[in-house]
Image (cartoon, grey):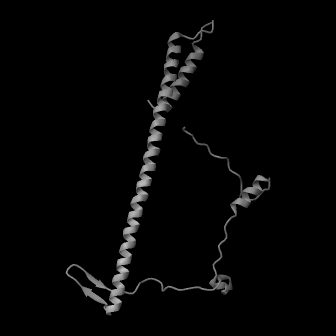
Amino acid sequence: MSILDLHHGSQILELWAEKSVDQFGELDPVLDKLLQELEGKIEDKVESYCRIIRELELTAKARAEEAARIKELADRDTNAAKQMKNRLQYFFSLQNLKKLETKSFRLSVCANGGHQPIEVSCDPSELPEQFQKVTVSANNEAIREALTMGTTLTGCKLLPRGEHIRIK
């Protein structure tokens, strides 16, 4: 039975309890016992639910840390391979080699594809307009401050804060 099932069960029992009150305001002992039993189950279920949440959070943290450690190792290997390839390319340039074949590998010095690289060393505002790119974005902090002060901005509104469960 899930915690939501327990919630619905407790609501149904409370409705029955309200209808089953005798003329003296006494609750049917059977219903009273069921309500007490259900309350304990709710606490036990929520306890178990919170333990699972905590375990998942700790597992996620451990996995994230392990992933970061492995990513760092992979980055080191990638950088080492790049350095070795650069050193090999430097050796090829010293030996004036363009191609070389070994027992297991065929190597060749090739030109990079794609767009030819450019360098823009001047301030972009000094370039003619057709060579400039302008990006406009909303200043969220200024908008939030204005809305908080009561200013009306078309297309902007403050949203309600969300809620979360804190487990200590």
* The one of 83 and 167 positioned closer to us in this rendering: 83
Residue visible at 69% across and 60% down in the picture: 140
Residue 153 seen anywhere in this rendered image of the structure: yes
Horizontal arrangement in the rendering, residue 41 relative to residue 128 (left or right) = left
Tell me: residue 47, above or below residue 148: above
Tell me: residue 122, above or below residue 51: below
Residue visible at 49% across and 19% down in the picture: 37
Horizontal arrangement in the rendering, residue 129 relative to residue 27 (left or right) = right
Q: Quadrant of residue 104?
A: bottom left
Residue 103 locus on image (x, y percent): 19, 81
* The one of 166 and 73 positioned closer to us in this rendering: 73
Q: Where the N terminus falls, by quadrant?
A: top left
Residue 109 seen anywhere in this rendered image of the structure: no
- Which residue extends farthest right? 150
Horizontal arrangement in the rendering, residue 34 relative to residue 74 (left or right) = right
Residue 40 locus on image (x, y percent): 50, 23
Residue 96 locus on image (x, y percent): 32, 93
- Which residue extends farthest left? 103
Residue visible at 31% across and 92% down in the picture: 95
Q: Where the C terminus falls, by quadrant?
A: top right
Q: Quadrant of residue 68?
A: bottom left
* The one of 16 and 64 positioned closer to us in this rendering: 64
- Which residue extends farthest bottom? 96
* The one of 137 and 52 positioned closer to us in this rendering: 52
Residue visible at 35% across and 85% down in the picture: 89
Tell me: residue 83, above or below residue 44: below
**In the rendered picture of this protein, how many numbered marks are placed on residues?**
0
Residue 4 locus on image (x, y percent): 50, 32
